[in-house]
Image (spheres, rainbow, N blue to C red):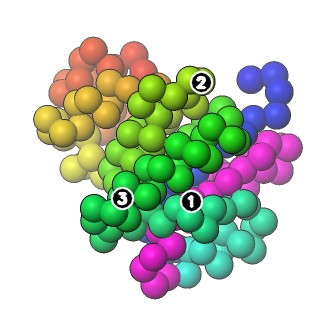
């Protein structure tokens, strides 16, 4: 990209733990390089990630809750607000980190033109295992990032048609 990018990071977690620290570090690097960075996390459940995001000055959307403990109406509402945000904001990249936020982002992009580039980091061993429910979502994902080459290899074995879309 030769222009300032609009990047959204999603993480269906309320805690500044696990992958949150390196994700915020990466987001900060892109922000420091002059890109626009937004960060959507679980804003329903108790945790300290929201405050860490605010301290860094990243924009957030109070209508998007991204809680893995959401059901029915809340999930539909998140998809609606994500889609509305994508239409108005026109992000270049949406970088997802958990299955919940990845699924919601992918559903929000159905039929959307232009659709942002969707990138997924697969942080855990379970996330690279073949599951029927993931196949469709993964097919509509533009790129995959893995924390280690072993996960990349497992992913390539399970999803050979998608192996050109990944990096470790």
Residue 97 in sight in this render? no
Please provide the residue range marked out in magenta: 26-47
Please tell me whether mark 1 or mark 3 is closer to you in this view: 3
Cα gap from disc 2 to disc 3, whole angstroms? 23 Å
Identified at 56% across, 64% down, the residue is 63
Q: Which residue is mark 2?
A: 114
Mark 2 vs 3, N-terminal side: 3
For residue 75, the mark is: 3
On screen, residue 113 above or below 52: above
**Quick one: SS at disc 3?**
helix
Identified at 75% across, 67% down, the residue is 56
Q: Position of residue 152 (x, y in %)?
A: 33, 32
**Quick one: SS at disc 1?**
strand
Contact? badges 2 and 3 (CB < 8 Å): no
Q: Position of residue 128 (x, y in %)?
A: 25, 40
How crowded is the residue under tag 3: few (<14 C-alpha within 10 Å), some, or many (20+)?
some
Q: Is residue 19 magenta?
A: no
Q: Nearer the viewer, residue 168 or 52?
A: 52
* Image quadrant in which the C terminus is located: top left
Cα gap from disc 2 to disc 1, whole angstroms? 20 Å
Q: Which residue is mark 1?
A: 40
């Amino acid at each position: 990209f030769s222009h300032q990018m609009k990047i959204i990071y999603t993480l269906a977690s309320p805690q500044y733990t696990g992958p949150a620290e390196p994700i915020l570090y990466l987001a900060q690097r892109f922000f420091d390089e002059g890109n626009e960075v937004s960060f959507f996390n679980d804003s329903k459940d108790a945790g300290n990630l929201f405050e860490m995001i605010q301290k860094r000055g990243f924009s957030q959307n109070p209508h998007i809750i991204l809680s893995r403990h959401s059901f029915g109406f809340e999930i539909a509402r998140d998809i609606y607000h994500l889609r509305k945000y994508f239409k108005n904001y026109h992000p270049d990249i949406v970088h997802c980190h958990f299955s919940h936020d990845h699924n919601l982002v992918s559903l929000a992009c159905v039929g959307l033109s232009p659709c942002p580039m969707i990138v997924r980091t697969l942080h855990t061993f379970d996330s690279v295992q073949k599951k029927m429910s993931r196949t469709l979502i993964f097919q509509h994902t533009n790129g995959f990032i893995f924390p280690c080459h072993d996960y990349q290899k497992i992913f390539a074995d399970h999803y050979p048609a998608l192996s050109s879309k990944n990096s470790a």
